[in-house]
Image: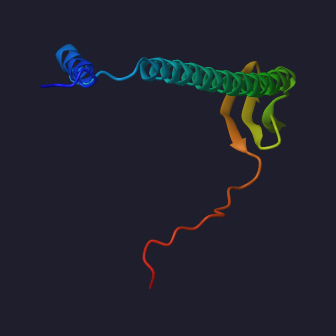
Amino acid sequence: MMSPCSAPAVSAAKEKKTRGNYQLPGFVHMGTSLLLSVFLILMLVVFSLLTLSSARNNQDFAQTLAQEKKAYFSACNQAERGLAEMENGECNWELTISDSLVLWVEATREGDCVTVHRWQVKNAQPWRNEDTLTVLNP
């Protein structure tokens, strides 16, 4: 016969097995949802910071590009004024766009006819290869 003290323990063990294979305590489920919430908030913060960084880089690039375009068109306007005031013959202009770029213009004028031979943006300094890559080591 069973003792009266051991009978409730056996019935409690049977109840756990009948409800499913060993249920986890309630606080584990609460901790999982908390960790998931913290992870999701952390991911939202990271993605928002990446978006902000990308937007700032795009704005800086757009402003730099706008300044370069403004300088280019200013040099073009100077060249066109020079073509309008040009006398008969051949003229060459080198107009500074920025520290690294110049506008090179070559034109000839015969009477009222102006012929532009070159309208080219060139580097102000010659290119120098500063990096080398060893393909085969002899």
Number of marks in the image? 0
Q: Give whichever of 68, 16 is nearer the camera.
A: 16
Picture residue at 70% right of the left edge, 42% below the top: 122
Q: Give whichever of 106, 36 is nearer the camera.
A: 36
State the image quarter where residue 100 is shown.
top right
Picture residue at 56% right of the left edge, 22% below the top: 38
Does residue 137 sit above or below 24 in this rendering? below
Q: On the rendered image, what quadrant is the C terminus found in?
A: bottom left
Colouring: rainbow
Q: Which residue, as the protein is rendered here, is positioned at the far left?
A: 1
Picture coordinates of residue 128 (x, y %)? 68, 61
Q: On the rendered image, what quadrant is the N terminus found in?
A: top left
Q: Is residue 110 visible?
A: no
Picture residue at 77% right of the left edge, 47% below the top: 124
Left or right: residue 52 versus residue 27 is right
Left or right: residue 6 versus residue 129 is left
Q: Can residue 26 be seen in this view?
A: yes
Q: Give whichever of 114, 71 is nearer the camera.
A: 71
Left or right: residue 96 versus residue 44 is right
Does residue 98 sit above or below 137 in this rendering? above
Picture coordinates of residue 13 (x, y %)? 23, 23
Picture coordinates of residue 97 (x, y %)? 80, 34
State the image quarter where residue 131 is shown.
bottom right
Does residue 105 sit above or below 2 in this rendering? below
Q: Which residue, as the protein is rendered here, is positioned at the far bottom?
A: 138
Picture residue at 44% right of the left edge, 71% below the top: 135
Picture coordinates of residue 14 (x, y %)? 19, 19
Q: Give whichever of 121, 35 is nearer the camera.
A: 35
State the image quarter where residue 4 is shown.
top left
